[in-house]
Amino acid sequence: MASLELRNVVKRYKSQTVLDNLSLTVADGETLVLFGPSGAGKTVLLRLVAGVIDPDEGKIFIGGEDMTDLDAEFRGVGMAFQNFALFPHMTAFDNIATPLQAKRSSQSAMKAGVESVAKLLKIGHVLSHRPRALSNGQKQRTALARALVGSPPVLLLDDPLRNVDAKLRFEMRLELPRLLADRGATVVYVTQDYKEAMALGDRIAVMSQGVIKQLGTPEQIYREPANIEIARLFGDPTINLLDVKPSRDAKGIYVGLSNVQVHLTGAYDATVGRDCVIGLRPEALSFVDEGTPAAIPVTVEAETPLNEKIVTLVRTVRGREILVSRPAGTPGQTEGRAHIAVDGKSALLFDHASGDRIGARNVVNLRSGEAA
């Protein structure tokens, strides 16, 4: 068993608190992604778990055992660092083999283990090279191979695909989940790439300023972001955010978009007359014919093809900009007047002052009404 638990962990550097009373549990065999901007505390958290640095407060448990005061070499943790941390005088093969050497593995077992993981990471042809002869991408994969080769019960990966090229990065997003599942390790994976986070994580912990802002499955984080900050971080193109002030009529609570009322379901009674923000994902909007019920009139400003999708910038009656995304090859208005419709299941409502998401998010009805 290799579950991981942090209890009320605090880490300070002089007057700066990098991790602030952070608690987190990662189940045995789970892959948890730590996602957030630079300076959020992600790498510091990994170094605490690895035993490279010590917490100022709190406890760290691995497999139910208190590891807080145990030296790094006794924790059974594998880690791939951001800065590679390769031994410059050793070949890639020898760097990768160091965990197996520490276990006193036989030469044949060491050779088989290194070659197997090197083949998977496509660095078999550079195993005889020293770090100075490797590209940054090859160094990154060598560090990742070293972390994987010993099959540690806990694996800490600090943005291991940062320096690889786009093609390999895409391939590794597909390969890594299977690789990690085969190893059976408990994984904590750091990234600033939301696509990588959603592709690799069983759960995602969104970090900011030393605390976890939201913890959930990739679908939960994307569809039910806890606040505007998180909603902006997930999605490309970014979510549309429009200031609104909900009103009430006989059918319920609504917000206005270009002479169309967007009715909301949920506990929104307290939002009437209150400053709020509605969030609309670009892919939740679609072009429709003018005669379509509840069609929202807009003006097309620009269109940008982005390989697999086309992003269109439109303006509402009141001049507010909205991005609409559709799959490449599908029809859509390219200029002039147009009409769009909202996929009600994906609309989000946030409090304007705090930025926190309010209640349910479903839009169930649209009809003609006041302008946005």
Image (tube, rainbow, N blue to C red):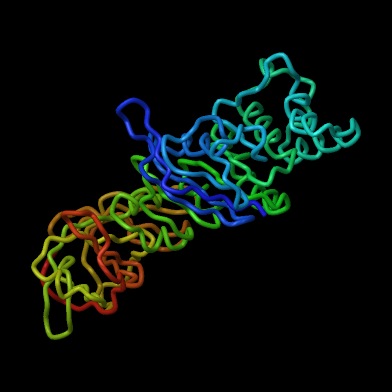
Q: Is residue 127 positioned above or below 334 on the image?
A: above
Residue nearest the viewer, comparing 243 with 67: 67
Taking the image as shown, residue 260 lies to the left or right of residue 24, namely: left
Q: Quadrant of the C terminus?
A: bottom left
Picture residue at 35% right of the left edge, 65% below the top: 286
Residues 151 and 66: in front is: 66
Residue 175 relative to residue 49: left or right:
right
Residue projecting furthest to the left: 273
> How far from the left and from the top, in percent, is residue 81?
57, 31
Residue 305 visible here = no
- State the residue at coordinates (60%, 48%): 65
Q: Position of residue 111 (x, y in %)?
A: 86, 32
- Residue 18 in the image: x percent, y percent? 37, 35
Quadrant in the picture for residue 267: bottom left
Q: For the view shown, which residue lies furthest in the bottom direction?
A: 250
In the displayed structure image, the side of residue 281 where residue 246 appears, left or right: left
Of residues 192 and 335, the one drawn nearer to the viewer in this rendering: 192
Residue displayed at 62% across by 36% down: 79
Q: Kindly identify the residue that appears in the image at 33 percent across and 66 percent down.
A: 287
Question: Is residue 14 at least partly visible in the picture?
Answer: yes
